[in-house]
């Protein structure tokens, strides 16, 4: 034992919530006429459910979007309405609401396919992303979260070339504005009815590293970071601790810069039927009797998401019963170890990292403020409690006890178990 003494100083992360959790908090007819009312009302709602920050969601307005809401598994929210560019006047109004409610911004978010094949659609998405970047500057938030996407007409290596040609200019625009782009890694299997599954090329550590090397070549490595969501890892049969260990082993423990707190519960019966990769045929996204092309009906196109939902269901943290065996099988998120592994393996300052609660649990996707509020409040509180427990364990084990040379008991979860 050593004589050295270190004080007990746990570092909890910052709690936020994605505003897509309740798309219709402000009715469409009201927020279309008064674009910033939705932001004001979401800031007040976040205060009421106990979340000190929001991840402010932007999206192409339904009147100009290229993907009909009926074809989406999880419809996006344009809480931040950017049909017209954001300006100083609008920013002052939002900042006044932030001051009044005591709720801040973790970051802005715009989730879309930045590598879509159609040139006009891609240009529209990139132009909109630049509006999001400009809004982030005016609102003094340092990051925007979103997807990279994929051109479904191309195989993976040509998509890397397209990333270099089309996405790097966006990162240069982010650099010019002093902001970071945080990529969420959802593979988006249901974005197309084709037999493509990885439709966001930034879906796992191997691709992140390949993309980051391209970014470094163009001087924008610091603008490319990952907003990690463990639900997607479970969907792909991965476990968080092993992924974080891989990043550390490869020298990329710095890449993860934020977290979406959303779980995934694997359906063992669905896995038995289809395996990882989900339902591959007879989904209903192709017209019976005419198999020359996918269905043009958006309500049929949504069936492409059976590649995912046939084998799993999203979890709102705190709402699912968990079996320790399921943790070891990587069939659900082990939230405590998730938070421990982040502290043990990643190059982060936990006190500066955001945990953003993302709500996509279908039975609880309630567009009723009064009914949803206690559900989100409970999930936010669960997230905070789990993280505080992990922060306490890390500080006690890796700082206080380590300084005094006191050994830890047991082994705990390990990476790369097979």
Image: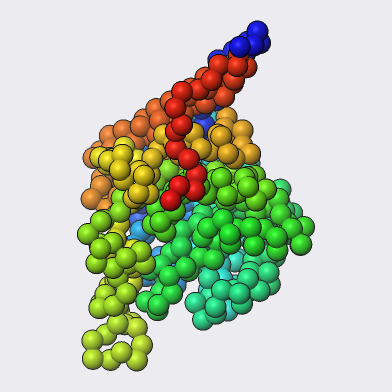
Asked whether 175 or 225 is in front, the reply is 225
Q: Is 315 left, or right, of 139 in this rendering?
A: left
Of 377 and 349, nearer the camera is 349
User: Is 390 rendered above or below residue 366?
Assistant: above
Residue at image point 34% right, 91% down: 292
Quarter that holds the N terminus: top right
Residue furthest to the top in view is: 3
Which residue appears at 27% of the width and 53% of the height? 362
| Residue in view at x 53 percent, y 75 percent | 151
What is the number of callouts on the image? 0
In the visual, does 177 lie left or right of 366? right
In depth, the one of 324 and 51 nearer the eye is 324
Q: Position of residue 321 (x, y in %)?
A: 25, 40
Residue 269 seen from this side: yes
Q: Which residue does the image show at 67% across and 58% down from the upper left?
A: 212
The x and y percentages for residue 296 are 33, 82
In the visual, does 315 lie left or right of 14? left
Q: Position of residue 316 (x, y in %)?
A: 33, 44
């Amino acid at each position: 034992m050593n004589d050295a003494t270190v004080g007990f100083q746990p570092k909890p992360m910052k709690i936020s919530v994605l505003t897509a959790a309740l798309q219709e908090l402000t009715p469409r007819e009201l927020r279309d006429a008064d674009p910033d009312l939705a932001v004001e009302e979401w800031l007040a709602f976040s205060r009421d459910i106990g979340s000190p920050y929001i991840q402010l969601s932007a999206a192409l307005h339904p009147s100009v979007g290229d993907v009909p809401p009926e074809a989406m598994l999880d419809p996006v929210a344009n809480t931040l309405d950017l049909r017209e560019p954001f300006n100083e006047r609008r920013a002052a109004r939002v900042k006044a609401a932030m001051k009044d409610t005591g709720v801040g911004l973790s970051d802005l978010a715009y989730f879309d396919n930045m590598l879509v094949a159609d040139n006009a659609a891609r240009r529209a998405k990139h132009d909109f992303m630049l509006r999001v970047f400009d809004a982030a500057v005016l609102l003094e938030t340092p990051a925007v979260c979103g997807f990279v996407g994929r051109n479904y007409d191309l195989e993976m290596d040509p998509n890397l070339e397209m990333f270099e040609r089309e996405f790097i200019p966006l990162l240069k625009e982010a650099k010019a504005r002093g902001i970071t782009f945080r990529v969420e890694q959802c593979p988006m299997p249901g974005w197309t009815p084709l037999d493509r599954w990885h439709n966001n090329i930034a879906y796992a550590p191997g691709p992140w590293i390949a993309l980051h090397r391209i970014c470094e070549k163009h001087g924008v490595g610091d603008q490319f970071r990952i907003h990690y969501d463990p639900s997607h890892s479970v969907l792909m049969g991965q476990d968080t601790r092993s992924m974080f260990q891989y990043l550390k082993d490869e020298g990329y423990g710095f890449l993860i810069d934020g977290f979406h707190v959303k779980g995934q519960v694997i359906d063992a019966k669905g896995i038995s039927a289809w395996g990882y990769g989900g339902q591959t045929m007879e989904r209903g996204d192709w017209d019976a009797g005419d198999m020359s092309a996918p269905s043009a009906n958006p309500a049929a196109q949504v069936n492409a998401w059976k590649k995912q939902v046939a084998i799993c269901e999203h979890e709102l943290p705190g709402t699912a019963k968990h079996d320790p065996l399921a943790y070891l099988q990587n069939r659900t998120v082990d939230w405590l170890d998730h938070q421990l592994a982040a502290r043990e393996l990643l190059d982060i300052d936990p006190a500066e990292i955001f945990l953003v609660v993302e709500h996509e649990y279908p039975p609880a996707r309630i567009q009723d403020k009064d009914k949803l509020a206690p559900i989100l409040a409970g999930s936010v509180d669960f997230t905070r409690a789990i993280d505080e427990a992990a922060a306490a364990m890390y500080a006690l084990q890796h700082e206080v006890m380590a300084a005094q040379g006191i050994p830890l008991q047991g082994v705990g979860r390990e990476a790369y178990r097979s």
